[in-house]
Image (cartoon, rainbow, N blue to C red):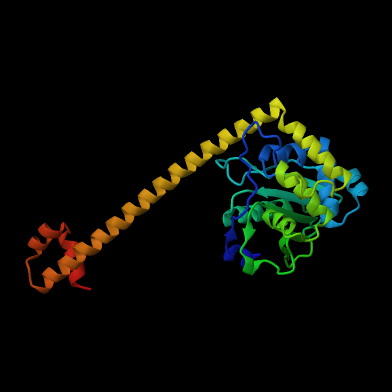
Amino acid sequence: MKTLLNKGLNTKNKFSSNILPEAKFYPLVNDCMFNSMFNNPKRKKYLCYFLSTFLNIDYDDLFNNIVFENNILEKDVPKESRRTVDCLCKYKNLFILIEMNNQSRVDVLKRNIDYMNKIYSSSRRVGSSYEYENIILINFNNFSFNEEVENSDSYMYASRHENLLDDIKIYQISLPKIREKMYNNIKLTKCEIFLLSCLLDEKEYEKIKGKGDDISMEYRKEAKRISKNEKFLMQNQLRQAEEFYWKVCESKVAKAAAKKAAKKAAIKESQKAKESIAKNMLNKRCDISLISEVTGLSNKQILSINSR
């Protein structure tokens, strides 16, 4: 995992999450659609189907035993804003954390690992200091890792990582790589066909139409219906407005930080220039009061330069 994070990312062929309200179909990378179709107990069959085909777990057993957990994590400090995960569920003694990542930033992946660790550390069973429940983190990445860090024999998974502990697993799913596999006419798995059914626009969907199971077609039909729902469209517009607001805030903070850093660097360079001039004047045996007048340095500062 560390190698992957250090190597960099490739944002080519992302699925668009910023689709206009009149769109006929919103893809799973859209936050509101993800909440409606995956993070929703009323439609748990779609999440269960994905997990069943991805993790090779019996679908009926998953459907009957999966429980949706609270996706709001506890704050570490009082002033911290609330932290939410995209989807958190539990199957028997296994926590499953799923994150949809549209931003191709390494810190987002690190944040997800931090969330996973917090869930894992809070899962200790009562009566034991060391017995923890299993946890899986599944990252849906709407970008690809650079070629040199991806498995050469895999089109779907950027990595499968297991920590020193057997009960922690991290999966990276590069969504653009699945589409690339489709366009290269490479045989698709049931899981891949289902995910493409959740992601492709109407034109691209024609390439796999009829290849999926009934549940893939059911997902497509229901997602298209939701895409036209007035309440969904209002929620989506609100979400986009919130994202725009936070981007503006982040931009202002970044600009302020950059301005502060630039000012600090300018002061440092100015100080170096003054000290250089003072040193040259000292070498020419100029009077300290004259050096102070020229450079603006105090007598103490000038004497400290002389003693270096």
Residue 144, quarter of the rendered image: bottom right
Given the current orientation, which residue lies at the most extreme top position?
A: 230
Q: Where, quadrant-wise, is the N terminus in this rendering?
A: bottom right
Report whether 56 appears left or right of 152.
right
> Percent x, y for residue 208?
79, 49
> Percent x, y for residue 273?
21, 63
**Can residue 88 be seen?**
no
Residue 152, quarter of the rendered image: bottom right
Q: Is residue 80 above or below residue 131?
A: above
**Can residue 168 be seen?**
yes
Report whether 157 appears left or right of 301.
right
Q: Which residue is more in the foreground, 43 or 204?
A: 204
Q: Is residue 286 above or below residue 20?
A: below
Q: Which residue is more in the foreground, 198 or 116?
A: 198
Q: Residue at x 33, y 54 (%)?
A: 264
> Percent x, y for residue 301?
20, 63
> Percent x, y for residue 80?
57, 42
Q: Where, quadrant-wise, is the C terminus in this rendering?
A: bottom left
Q: Residue at x 46, y 44 (%)?
A: 251
Q: Which residue is more in the foreground, 175 or 64?
A: 175
Q: How many marks?
A: 0
